[in-house]
């Protein structure tokens, strides 16, 4: 089995993004599956083009995308992506779509094919906080999760795909009162556990 | 310089206490100071007797006590201890004092002698969340902080002393939604940075 | 214009539900529109049957459903309903579906037809906290929002419909530390302002 | 019995302060006690001079001061005031003392003489959120609470005094996500219930 794991680059004024940092540190094999790592830009549309190119090149069985969700305290596999771009801030290319469909001909939403409850249990068994999330928001994270599902629906029917949000790093919250964080080491451990659950299914 | 660092054992239904776990993993020397480590029971009065015995035996220049504060997201050096025992739950010996002074002849409160703002800056510089706290509560943590100050006021005038609360570990919040945590590695790094700030002062 | 406003009865161990209490206190006319009020049971499927019967009897132009979302601090119009029942607790009839579609032949999700951003602005202009929500959860609230959209898709194409969550009442959080609440008077004011925004569109 | 109830004017960029707004709306008699209302400036030292003048003029049996504590969800009677001014922002006169004692010859702290647990129970019985607070911070609220206690210790030994923090108003949090609030009507009800508990003692 081959799993493509993607991570976003920094955005929103942050100089680091735990998503790509954690992805870079994953082992090359998890539970027997080959792990292919990919950095994606925090840009509407272009992030999806980058992932599509990697799917064509690598032919993975699974795509798992990782993104940062400040304010969350746990690793949160996402249930569903919705067909809406609505940016509170511009992306890294300066685009800020408001109330726009991602794909005018796409479904209103796509559910993930990944075993998110098993992923959460695996994260918790690894001694880390995990929760299913029922919203990926309306920014670039939801956008990419939706776009990969749309690619699945239109081009790659055998693909299974999903998204997981991870908290801020401790170094991002040094002076933000009451803001939860999780260390990079634990991000890597948690993503690894979640991927093992995907392989085990 | 010799620094006595104390950590509480588990309480309140938890099977671990990050306080004593982190203290155990501190190096034996920090910024040139000798670190002496001490486990203390989560019991009113007896915790203070154990620390007093260690002060007599070790003659430290500084006492830094570490305790767990669930729900906090940062390492929080405490500003002040107040002369009140008021337990929401019994301690590990079954005692649950309500609205009782700790020392009938003691001051209403004692401020720490430790450089808590410098400690917070050092924690933040280490890339970890740090905040000054203005309340240590009314349970065993405040009790011990107060008692050590009372010992200073009555027996050990050269002593400098203080308290720092640390968050839950990730393993304690696996299924607690929205509950912040910090890893043991980061607890150790943060306590080490705080101690270096004490030494540097 | 006629607007059917529904409110759920109490559930989850609570003895009151601000949703139905607030709905009962709405005026009979808001911004010229006729307001029809309906109590619905916190039960999968039956809540939808009750609303369908009322749509047939009353022929409303708009259905706005109100539900309680403990832990939220604001009035939150919902963006989207998803095709999933996944109960953390049983409903008031003892049903607890897990990972079940609401309508096997339904869309994965339906977006609301209501002007949720204008509703939020109207709530804020009334001096009350308002935020768009991108998830109605996977319990009976999302279920009803989805079912009314499904009715629209299959039976009542002219209908516009949506859902708004409201916080706990102060009386529900008397001893819940740090739990936000909103008064019934403010719920009524906020729902009224939101309905006026629907009428104005 | 005569009770002097004080409320602060707006500060920190807010155009209203629920403290003085609520105080203004209190009845003139509560549980048989005469209520005297006083607006105080959000300024170190001068707030205390204004209260001292009112104590001399009115000879109250009790002083209850009310202040705003943004981020809190409940009415929170304060346990203790500490001898420290440490402003995160300047007060309304531009003063921003850092790490300064309020009274160089004063005690480290003073406990309130008011029955704070009975006040909390009365607030909860009125159907409103109430919690004891163990910190009034280090800004003007703590300052005034401390100063009134210092006046009691040095000039007015028969006085009983205390402080209660109240949340933001809904109108102050219209666009602050996840920020709790409480309505002015409920502030007035809660303060009234707390005062009745003071009288009943």
Image (cartoon, coloured by chain):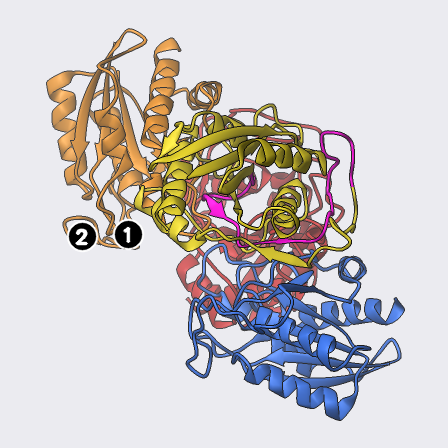
Chain colours: A red, B blue, C orange, D yellow
The secondary element bearing badge 1 is classed as: loop
Query: Closer to the camera, C82 or A53?
Result: C82
Q: Position of residue A198 (x, y in %)?
A: 47, 63
CB contact under 8 Å: marks 1 and 2? yes
The secondary element bearing badge 2 is classed as: loop
Q: Position of residue D134 (x, y in %)?
A: 55, 56
Query: Closer to the camera, D47 or A119?
Result: D47
Query: Closer to the camera, A124 or D175?
Result: D175
The residue located at (58%, 53%) in the rendering is D135
Question: Residue D84 lies in magenta, yes or no?
Answer: yes
- Mark 1 sits on what residue? C87
Question: Residue D71 lies in magenta, yes or no?
Answer: yes
Q: For mark 2, does the 10 Å Cα neighbourhood hold few (<14), some (14 to 19), or many (20 or more) residues?
A: few
The chain letter for the residue carrying disc 2 is: C
Q: For mark 1, does the 10 Å Cα neighbourhood hold few (<14), some (14 to 19), or many (20 or more) residues?
A: some
Q: Position of residue B87 (x, y in %)?
A: 46, 69
- Mark 2 sits on what residue? C95
Dominant SS type (magenta): loop
Magenta range is D68-96
Q: Position of residue D32 (x, y in %)?
A: 34, 36
Sequence-wise, which precedes: disc 1 or disc 2?
A: 1
In this rendering, position of residue B3 left or right of residue B6: right
């Amino acid at each position: 089995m081959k799993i493509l794991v993607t991570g976003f680059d920094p955005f929103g004024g942050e100089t680091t993004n735990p998503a790509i940092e954690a992805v870079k540190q994953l082992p090359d094999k998890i539970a027997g599956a080959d792990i292919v790592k990919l950095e994606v830009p925090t840009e509407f549309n272009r992030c999806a083009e980058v992932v599509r190119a990697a799917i064509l090149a690598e032919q993975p069985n699974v795509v798992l995308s990782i993104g940062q969700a400040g304010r969350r305290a746990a690793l949160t596999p996402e249930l569903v992506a919705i067909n809406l771009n609505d940016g509170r801030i511009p992306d890294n290319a300066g685009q800020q779509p408001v109330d726009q469909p991602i794909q005018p001909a796409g479904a209103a939403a796509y559910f993930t094919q990944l075993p998110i409850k098993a992923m959460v249990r695996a994260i918790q068994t690894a001694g880390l906080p995990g929760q299913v999330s029922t919203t990926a928001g309306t920014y670039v994270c939801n956008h990419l999760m939706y776009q990969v599902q749309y690619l699945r629906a239109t081009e790659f029917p055998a693909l299974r795909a999903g998204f997981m949000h991870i908290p801020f790093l401790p170094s991002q919250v040094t002076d933000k009162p009451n803001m939860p964080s999780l260390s990079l080491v634990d991000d890597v451990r948690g993503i690894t556990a979640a991927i093992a659950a995907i392989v085990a299914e």
